[in-house]
Structure formats: structure tokens, C-alpha cells
Image (cartoon, rainbow, N blue to C red):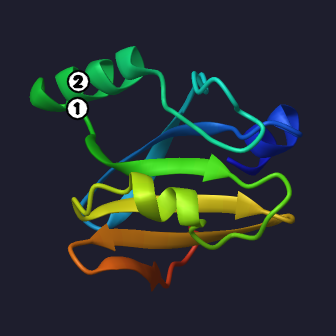
Amino acid sequence: MQSAAKAAHPLECCGILLGEGGCITGVIETLNVHPTPQTHFEIDPQALIDAHKAERKGGLRLMGYFHSHPTGDAYPSETDKKMATHDGKVWAIIAGGGMMFWTDDKDGFHALSYDVGSR
């Protein structure tokens, strides 16, 4: 995810988080199809459809999304808060060489603790 953010800079990168249980075990980098990718992101709808189809066929669960803030911090922006669907998905936000994970539930965004491991 961090390499995707670096490669996309000064635009926002985005993608899908996949996993099982409470573990994110895979990511899919997607196109940012938003008309102003310098300050916004929109995951390619076909990539979302494909991830949902794969999950239904027994693949990894779509656990959430990631995107970068090229000039901001790793906290949900006002735009992120307005676009959130409060569906309980995980959001990873990459900024300034760091990354934070958030859950988007009915009460808004909440920071998540996490460990980086290897499989």
C-alpha cells in the first residue's frame, strides 16, 4: 500500500483490503477513477464488483479499502467522513510515510490497533 501511495503521488492511490477473520491478508490496487484524484479517491467500480464476486465464490472477504492522502495526514478527512457508508469496513489511510487503520461504523471512524506480521 505504501509503494502504491508513493507511485501515485501527487495523486491519491486506492484499493481493496481482503482477508479473513480479523486479518488483512491481501490487497488489490485499483484505479482511482475520481475526476479530481489530487484530492479525492473513487475505487474502480468493476474492481469492487469483481472482489464481491470472488468472495461469493469462496475467495477472501472484502474487509475494506485503502487510499492515500498525498498532502495530508493518515486521519479520515472531512471528505472521507462525508463519503463513508458506516458499513463496518476497515479503511487504511497512507500519508507522510505512515499508515493508520480505521473502522467505519454507525458512529463514524474509530482508530484500530494492528500488528504487521508475515505468513
Q: Position of residue 41 (x, y in %)?
A: 59, 38
Please name the residue shown 47% across and 22% down the image.
44
Label 1: how many Cα within 10 Å (few below 14, some 14–19, many 20+): some
Q: Is residue 117 left or right of residue 44?
A: right
The answer to whether 37 is drawn above or below residue 87 in the figure is above
Please name the residue shown 51% across and 33% down the image.
42
Q: Is residue 69 left or right of residue 50?
A: right
Q: Is residue 92 left or right of residue 52?
A: right
The answer to whether 22 is drawn above or below residue 60 in the figure is below
Q: Which numbered disc flags the more N-terminal residue, 1 or 2?
A: 2
Q: Looking at the picture, which amino acid does disc 2 mark?
A: Ala
Please name the residue shown 51% across and 58% down the image.
80
Please name the residue shown 61% across and 48% down the image.
67
Q: Which disc number belongs to residue 112?
A: none
The answer to whether 11 is drawn above or below residue 94 in the figure is above
Residue position marked by numbered label 1 in the rendering: 59
Front residue of this view, candidates 6 and 76: 76
| Label 2 secondary element | helix
Q: Position of residue 47 (x, y in %)?
A: 40, 21
Q: Is residue 119 visible?
A: no
Q: Is residue 42 visible?
A: yes
Q: Which disc number belongs to residue 54?
A: 2
| Label 1 secondary element | loop
Q: Are marks 1 and 2 in contact (CB under 8 Å)?
A: yes
